[in-house]
Amino acid sequence: GDSVTQTEGQVALSEEDFLTIHCNYSASGYPALFWYVQYPGEGPQFLFRASRDKEKGSSRGFEATYDKGTTSFHLRKASVQESDSAVYYCALGDHGNYAQGLTFGLGTRVSVFP
Amino acid sequence: GALVYQYPRRTICKSGTSMRMECQAVGFQATSVAWYRQSPQKTFELIALSTVNSAIKYEQNFTQEKFPISHPNLSFSSMTVLNAYLEDRGLYLCGAREGTVSGNTLYFGEGSRLIVV
């Protein structure tokens, strides 16, 4: 079945550091890729998505580029703030198939210290 | 924007009793709703996906007898956890999608946390 692998389980950074979270996927078809962020006590919030090879998604200073060749969708942010501390989830879904849910990675806990 | 409200936010129930949770989509029409359970051990487990005017599709290890779902219209869905036991603890999330403009993006509510004692 489809799967998403996030390499980093936890990341600790200082403010203004560069953030990278690695996400690789395995899917039989040509999936849409997503990033979600979850703050303590809240549900996951949609950050952005990308639907085709080389497409870049971005929101709130975060960005990721769909790379079909390396089956990756790595999340990056140039300068993190303490308010970016949260758990980030990479997910995939079948294009145009609304009869399926999304498959999520295990998440990466990001802690940003002042 | 697309908003999803879930309630109750938290329920403490005795082992063997049931809990009903509700999900309301505001600002868009929820043509399909995915119910997930989130736990520290298993991150996101998809329970079922409900599409208006179609049969509800349950994932392996989840059944209608245990997790009955109702999705009567394009703004509301509910799910009940029947005969809850310790292994049913977790944060139950409702993710709704509009299905056309936003593609298959799911917008989640805050979750309904089930605590079983």
Image: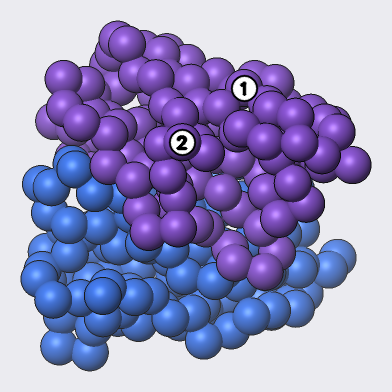
Q: Where is residue B73 in the image (x, y as percent from the top left)?
A: 29, 10
The quarter holding residue B1 reads top left
Q: Which amino acid does label 2 sit on?
A: Glu
User: Dot 1: few (<14), some (14–19), or many (≥20) neighbours within 10 Å?
Assistant: some
Mark 2 element type: loop
State the residue at coordinates (35%, 82%): A24
Secondary structure, mark 1, is strand
Chain letter for the blue part: A
Q: In this view, does A81 lie to the left or right of A45?
A: right
Corner quadrant of residue B48: top left
Q: Chain B is drawn in which colour?
A: purple
Horizontally, residue B117 falls left or right of residue A29, namely right
Residue A96 at x, y percent in the picture? 10, 46
Chain bearing mark 2: B
Question: In the picture shown, does residue A46 fall above or below A1?
Answer: above
Q: Where is residue B86 in the image (x, y as percent from the top left)?
A: 78, 51
In the picture shown, does residue A96 fall above or below B19?
A: below
Closer-to-camera residue (A50/B41) = B41
Residue annotated with mark 1: B20
Query: Circle 2 sits on which residue?
Result: B65
